[in-house]
Image (spheres, grey):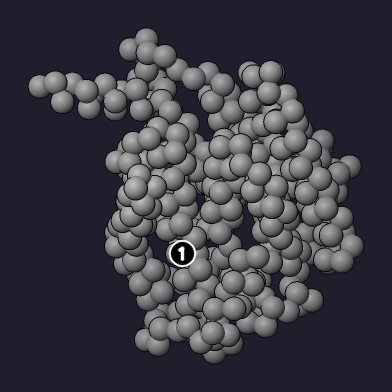
Amino acid sequence: MLQINNYKHSLKALSAYFLLSYAFLYFAYKYFSPSIACVDFFNYYPLYKNFDIKSVVTPFNTRLLNPLIVFVFSKLGIHYNTYISFQNPNIDQSIFFNALLVSYLAVVFTAFTVYLTCYNYFKNKLFGFLFGLFYLLGGGTVVFCINPATDAFSVLLLALIFKSYIEKNKWIYLLLLLAIFQREYIFMVISLVAIIDFWFDKKNFKKYLKVVLASTTCFGIYIILRNTILYTPFHSEQLEYNQYISRLLFPEMNFAEYIRQGLFTQNILAAYVCVIIYKRIKKLNIIRKNIWIVLMLILQINFICLIALLGNNIGRIFYMTTPILLFYLAIEVYPMYNKYQLNQSNN
């Protein structure tokens, strides 16, 4: 009976996320313009329309999972026929709608995955729901995810992988295989998390080693595919390994804009930092291992952006780690939340 109740509550949580956010999809469809805010849409369009891999340049032709779903939705005839701001005679409006729809669904199910992750760990339904809601209303969620590109689905896949990782679920290996055709950054993130977890918990060496080896193997497969079957000369500079050191030593970019783009959309990271500072001032217990992971993830994305010449995309790419940040934030907040709940019940 407990399992049935949990199932019903999960369904209510998922329904609530849809109810609170469906207007985001409507607003994006009516007023969003990929010509201004998401030019990557045009690179993905041949995949969305005909799943034509040969007409798409790298690295976009390696991100096939999300476009495949958009392609299937379009073939099923899913469409909302209304006047929208984005008008392009070369773009099928129904495909634009389905690209947004898939991203929106990914956002909702990411919020739901965050809820499940927190609920399974803390066994508190309201607390888990609030953290799923935090993702749903995150600054980067609206800016980077509810658009016709593939970031939202990448966040969902990383959220599912991280959930499987902390719950020691073997589904993680299948999800990592799927990530080969979605986003290579996922392998870098989960490997780093596992390595630092090992550093603080050496007795579970095999668990972490398996994840690192699986991630490294999948990343290796991705590199092979990108350099062979899926090779195009576009963005080949990202794999010019002999240039990495010079790019780190002599970066060519507008650092003021680089920092602004990286920080201004990271309200969830800002919340985590504020909680850590507050607990430090109050001399409350802090999980240092998680702080190290967050710091290393920040260092990692800066390193990646500099060597791969990704420009001012640091904030957008780093936002994919949000489900991990939310879980670590939840770990820090829960003792204070639990204490508050106990005090309220005693009054």
Q: What crowding class fits label 1: few (fewer than 14 Cα within 10 Å), some (14-19), or many (20 or more)?
A: some
User: Where residue 99 appears, x then y in whole percent?
Assistant: 53, 72
Q: Which residue is mark 1?
A: 105
Q: Quadrant of residue 270?
A: top left
Q: Residue at x 35, y 27 (%)?
A: 334
Is residue 264 shown to the viewer in this render?
Answer: no
User: Where residue 55 appears, x then y in whole percent?
Assistant: 76, 77
Q: Is residue 165 left or right of residue 97?
A: right
**What amino acid is found at the position of numbered circle 1 in the picture?**
Leu
Q: Quadrant of residue 214?
A: top right
Residue situated furthest left in the rendering: 347
Q: Residue at x 50, y 43 (%)?
A: 323
User: Where residue 287 appears, x then y in whole percent?
Assistant: 49, 20
Q: Residue at x 40, y 79 (%)?
A: 85
User: Where residue 216 appears, x then y in whole percent?
Assistant: 79, 42
Q: Residue at x 22, y 27 (%)?
A: 341
Vertical comparison of 99 with 163: above or below: below
Quarter of the image for the C terminus: give it. Answer: top left
Is residue 300 shown to the viewer in this render?
Answer: yes
Vertical comparison of 329 with 343: above or below: below
